[in-house]
Amino acid sequence: MEESAFLTAANATLDKIGLALDAALETSDKDVDWSLNDGVLTIECDDGSRIIVNRHLPNRELWVAARSGGLHFRADNGRWRDARGQDELGATLTRLLKTQARLNVRMPELSAPSDD
């Protein structure tokens, strides 16, 4: 995959995650903050823990770090899928945010570029 295609898709995905977080926080009383800087999205939970989603350009992957561990997502037929399983990024983030931040987030479709 070309670097530019990866960066475009990864940045769009990080932006969509941020928008979903904003929407969830509008109706929540949870003290969760998030920031996006240079391809690194950091979600600070009210218990002091963090969930981090970042681009990893050399591998053309999105990496997620959470209290439960680290995951790598790569483009697979237009979806970001876990490199060790078939979980999709959106479903995984929804689960992690509910468990770790106690925040219900309705994640939009997070499209990845074709992997050809």
Image: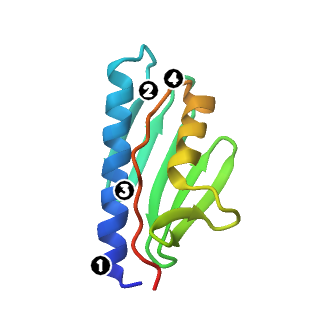
Eye-nearest disc, 2 or 1 = 1
Residue lying at 53% horizontally and 69% vertically, measured from the top left: 74
Q: To which residue does mark 1 refer?
A: 4
Q: Secondary structure at mark 2?
A: loop
> Disc 2 or disc 3, which is closer to the eye?
3
How far across and down, in percent of the image, does residue 61 sit?
50, 69
Residue 15 drawn at (x, y percent) = 30, 50
Q: Quick one: SS at disc 3? A: helix
Residue shown at the point (56%, 55%) measured from the top left: 88
Does residue 84 lie above or below 21 as drawn?
below
How far apart marks 3 and 1 lie (CA) works out to 14 Å
> Which one is earlier in the sequence, the residue at label 3 or at label 4?
3
State the residue at coordinates (63%, 57%).
Answer: 71
Cα distance between the residues tagged 4 and 1? 35 Å
Q: Foreground mark, 3 or 4?
A: 3
Check disc 4 and report the residue beneath it: 46
Q: Quadrant of residue 4?
A: bottom left
